[in-house]
Amino acid sequence: MDALDALLNRVSAPRLTEPAPDALQRQVLFRAALRAPDHGQLRPWRFLTVEGSDRNRLGELFASALGADATPEALAKALAMPLRAPLLVVVIARVQEHPKVPAQEQVLAAGCAAHGILLAAHAQGIGAVWRTGELSYNARVAKGLGLAENEQIIAFLYLGTPERELRTPQDLPLEQFVQAWP
């Protein structure tokens, strides 16, 4: 698949199953992530992979983060969330003090790294979906994943084999999003 095809046709694959990407495919995913725009070459990102029984442990962390007043339904949902794909990649922005590269730019660079993983997945026929939600911003989840004070979760990328054929992306009218200035 060429680059323009990947850019123009990538869609989320919310229903994923085994197998997960293999070792060679993962190398391509992370090499693509490392090509994200990176002012100052700070490399303001890092990645955690979660698979196998560790997905259950992540679900337990999610459930514990909901607190004592969580409903049984909410707890069940939190426990099951990491089981929606055989591989999860936690994308973490690692913001560093820098006189020329503001924090927001570093977070955006980490977001671009996440997008690089999604594009590389699509180009290899791997299904992927970017998820966040309230647990992405939860202090207990951050601590349980070992994040430092200067780090934040950008995405939980779910990766695997699509359970069904991917949809065709909607062709959006460019004039709704692009205007000349002034």
Image (cartoon, grey):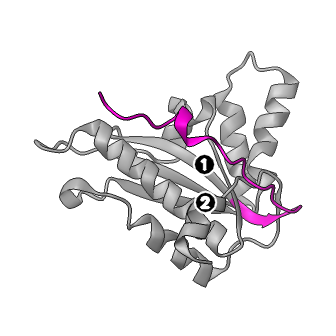
Residue 52 appears in the figure:
no
Residue on which disc 2 sits: 8
Question: As drawn, is 75 to the left or to the right of 10?
Answer: right
Using the image, tell me which numbered label, if any, was put on residue 156.
Answer: 1
Amino acid type, mark 2: Leu
Determine the main secondary structure of the stretch shown in magenta.
loop
Q: How many marks?
A: 2
Position of 63 compared to 115: left or right? Answer: right
2 or 1: mark nearer the eye: 2
Residue found at x 72% / y 42%: 60
Q: Quick check: 112 above or below 5?
A: above
Q: Closer to the N terminus: mark 2 or mark 1?
A: 2
Q: Amino acid at mark 1?
A: Phe
As drawn, 99 above or below 121: above
Q: Residue at x 65, y 76 (%)?
A: 124
Q: Which residues are magenta?
A: 159-182
